[in-house]
Amino acid sequence: MILSMKPPYDITPKILKLIASISEKIGEVNAHYLSKQSPQLRKQNRIKTIQSSLQIEGNTLTEEQITALIENKKVIGPKKDVLEVLNAISVYDEITHYKLNSEKDFLKAHAKLMKGLIKNEGKYRNQSVGIAKGNKIQHIAPPFKNVPHLMKDLFDYLKNDEELTLIKSCVFHYEMEFIHPFIDGNGRMGRLWQTVILLNEYPVFEFLPFETLISETQKEYYKALSLSDKSGKSTPFIEYMLGVIETSLAQLLSYNNRTFKDVDRLEYFLNLGLKEFSRKDYMNIFKDISSATSSRDLKKGIAMKLFKSYGELNKTIYRVR
């Protein structure tokens, strides 16, 4: 299969419905400033992303062990698993610096992700490969001589096609898995680069761990890849991945609505970087709380010495320390 400038896929009613739902949820995320999550929540989500993406590849480290590695603590575990996590931490720390349509950045990310794990990290494979499941060959990748050309076409699609970013990200993920450009690390690179593509337009995806849902639905993940292989189009995989994204956004909205307490709201609000604000400003961010609740929150913030208040009643201004 030689890729054209635009890889083959169909826009189905299911895809259109999912895109509408995702767009609505992203609007809700932005309206509640959930894309600017508290540092604690961002850290938790980053840990979930790394743990889930590597677990799909057989890594055994737990979220607790990954947390310890992020905090530069020693962890007892298989040497390979620890190295995989350390590599992933360094890559995801740099995720906002990668340019989505840069093949150079793509190879650089692979080199970091697979450092010390394979010999030719950051380089396309120079041998033929087949992907086996049990005793059966599930997929024979294109000849290695075609890989540079195929990957160039795929990056040209990212650069030049006017397709929606949501669809582009799914198409790239599938086509990259089909090409299987590396000896190892293809799965984690597909998931990483889909995040990089989405991040270009939607900041929330830096900390939205949709890999967790892929990890929990691995059978469906591999089935969608297989169905796309058989049909010669990435349509089944696009439908699957958009479903994963939609569910992950729904979980984010549900999680924040369920768990926000006064301290969470204060931390969240201060993370927006305002130097001074009014109670009205505070309530504009948290639209679902009452004026009495906002007053209690702000009193708590003063007691915690997060900010000082000046003025009286509805003219009170709060200045961040």
Image: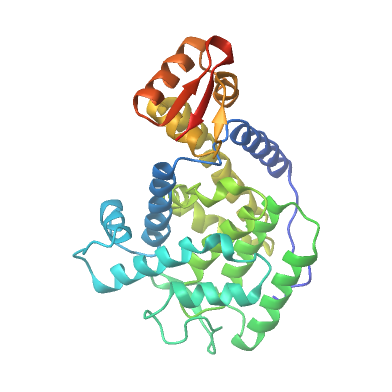
Quadrant in the rendering for residue 117: bottom left
Above or below for 294 versus 73: above
Q: Is residue 183 left or right of residue 151?
A: left
Q: Residue 87's spot in the image, x, y percent?
A: 39, 70
Residue 279, horizontal then vertical, whole percent: 55, 19
User: Which residue is located at x 62 percent, y 36 percent?
Assistant: 30
Could you tell me which residue is drawn at 46 percent across and 31 percent down? 256
Residue 234, position as x, y percentages in the image: 66, 59
Seen in the picture, residue 17 relative to 59 is either above or below; the reply is above
In which quadrant will I find the N terminus? bottom right
Q: Which is more toward the observer, 102 or 291?
A: 291
Quarter of the picture holding the C terminus: top left
Q: Is residue 163 above or below residue 242?
A: below
Any part of residue 254 in sight: no
Q: Nearer the viewer, residue 278 or 204?
A: 278
Q: Can you name the residue that lies furthest to the left here?
A: 76
Query: What's the residue at 54%, 76% (across, down)?
Result: 108
Could one spot residue 223 in this view of the protein?
yes
Residue at 67% across, 51% down: 201
Left or right of residue 2, residue 65 in this image: left
Q: Position of residue 106 (x, y in %)?
A: 59, 72
Colouring: rainbow
